[in-house]
Amino acid sequence: MDHPTGAGSEGDFRVDFDPRVRLEFHGSKISSNGGLLLFRELDEVLGLHDLAGQSLQDTRRGKNGVHSLVGLLRQSNFGRLAGYPDVNDAERLAHDPVMRQVVGGRAVDEWAASTSQMARFETDILTSAHNRAALADMPGQWIDALHDAQSPKWITLDMDSSVSPTHGDQEGTAWNGHFGCKCYHPLFVFNQFGDLERCALRKGNVHSADGWKEVMAPVIARYKKRDLMRFFRADAAFAIPELYEMLEAESYFYTIRLKGNAVLREAVSHLLKRPVGRPPNYVQRFYHDFEYRAASWAKARRVIAKVEWHPGDLFPRMGFVVTNLPMEPKWIIRFYNQRGTAEQHIKEGKYAINWTRLSCKRFRDNEVRLQLHALAYILGSFLKRADLPEEVADWSLTSIQSRLIKIGARVVRHARKITFQLAEVAVPRNIFGQILTAIRALKPPPRPT
């Protein structure tokens, strides 16, 4: 199966700086995405896309579909993971030997899906009401599959919103004054491992907490089945009495930032006077623990205040957190501050997966694109859950993409064997083997019959 342009000598080139150098092109035999084979093994070990195939409905009529629904979904997700966020990229990926191998089926011996096939898949098949709901639930199903293999002792959920700038007259786009642009305003829930539990695309002008219940309720329902401690963190946009009550009813410990008001400031008035003596050249921090009941609350709740005096500042900086945790105030504030990791996960999704690239006209098409971006992000995140060798254990998703996925590979096909010859530039053979072993160790135990 050769590339349409061929691999003969007619298309070869030479360079003037060294007449011995000859440039040949073997598009269907050489790939720059060799590391995707590791993620295909991860997919196989956890059965991720097989789960997806059980949830999605194939709305194609007739029996002439060249590629299975699971194969199309693999091509969509693995392509995004490798840095190809648009269906236009499918034209060249269709001939990529690694992509053909990870898609499977007919793609191995022929071609993967073309641009037109991928466009119909993403903007027609997946945009049905059933499939959009199934895609929204899929991150949770995948995370459950991983937790069956590695059961955590606790779960910490971080909720945050983000911005996806829009261009032109797209459905649902609107000006957002906070971000200063026309955009969509998606909502995300991550866990402490960096896995994306659930997300939702929203119009650009909605409040940061709009639709929180529709996103949080399915996540809470999933973890009801597991025996573990549960925690939740969010910023002041999610300081909502109904959210407190839901978390308390479901036995979640939470820390949620509160906006300051006159009553809260009065409670810490004794800490707002400048400390006696010469101001030090370091930050002075003071904590205060008190009960507070807002007018919209059904009961009083514990509030932790932190007051900081910074060198050179005329007035102190203060912050308030409402919580039901029984720990010391300093520990609670430190635990809340770790919520910033959710912002780092959002940045990784933006830069590695390009999940802000929502350029379709219809809002429901962009909903599907965001969910597909999310699944690609989860594939990358799952690799970091394995017992990776020290050399790669701290790599970000961006580093994984540029140094592990982007490995040059040459395919050699025989009657009974397919060999991928991988370059050893960023990842040597022994490290690659250790990663493969770590992935296989994630295999969940067999279910009792």
Image: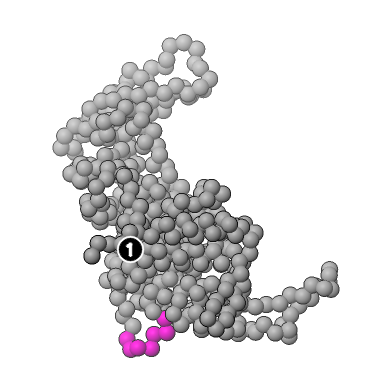
Question: As shown in the figure, which amino acid type bears the numbered disc 1?
Answer: Met
Q: Main secondary structure of the magenta part?
A: loop
Residue 351's place in the image compared with 19, above or below, is above
Which residue shows up at 51% across the image and 84% down it? 110
Q: Is residue 361 above or below residue 225?
A: below
Instruction: Using the image as rendered, state which of residue 184 and residue 371 is in the foreground.
Output: 371
Farthest left residue in view: 298
Callout 1 crowding tier (Cα within 10 Å): few <14, some 14–19, many ≥20: many
The one nearer the camera, 287 or 11, is 11
Which of the 4 image quadrants contains residue 299?
Answer: top left
* Label 1 SS: helix
Q: Position of residue 355 (x, y in %)?
A: 45, 60
Q: Is residue 100 above or below residue 295?
A: below
Q: In the visual, does 101 lie left or right of 193?
A: right
- Please provide percent x and percent y for residue 195: 39, 53
The question of residue 441 being in magenta is answered with: no
Residue 40 in picture, x, y percent from top left? 46, 67
- Viewed as shown, does residue 409 lie left or right of 232? right
Q: Which residues are magenta?
A: 61-67
Query: Is 81 placed above or below 305 here?
Result: below
Observer able to see residue 386: yes
Tell me where residue 337 appears, x and y as whole percent: 40, 37
**Residue tagged by mark 1?**
138
Q: Determine whether, in the image, residue 431 is placed left or right of residue 365.
A: right
**Left or right: 294, with 335 as reference point:** left
- Look at the image and tell me in which quarter the N terminus lies: bottom right
The residue positioned 35% from the left and 59% from the top of the image is 444
* Residue depicted at x 50% and y 54%: 397
Of 116 and 44, which appears nearest the observer?
44
Give the total number of marks visible in the rendering: 1
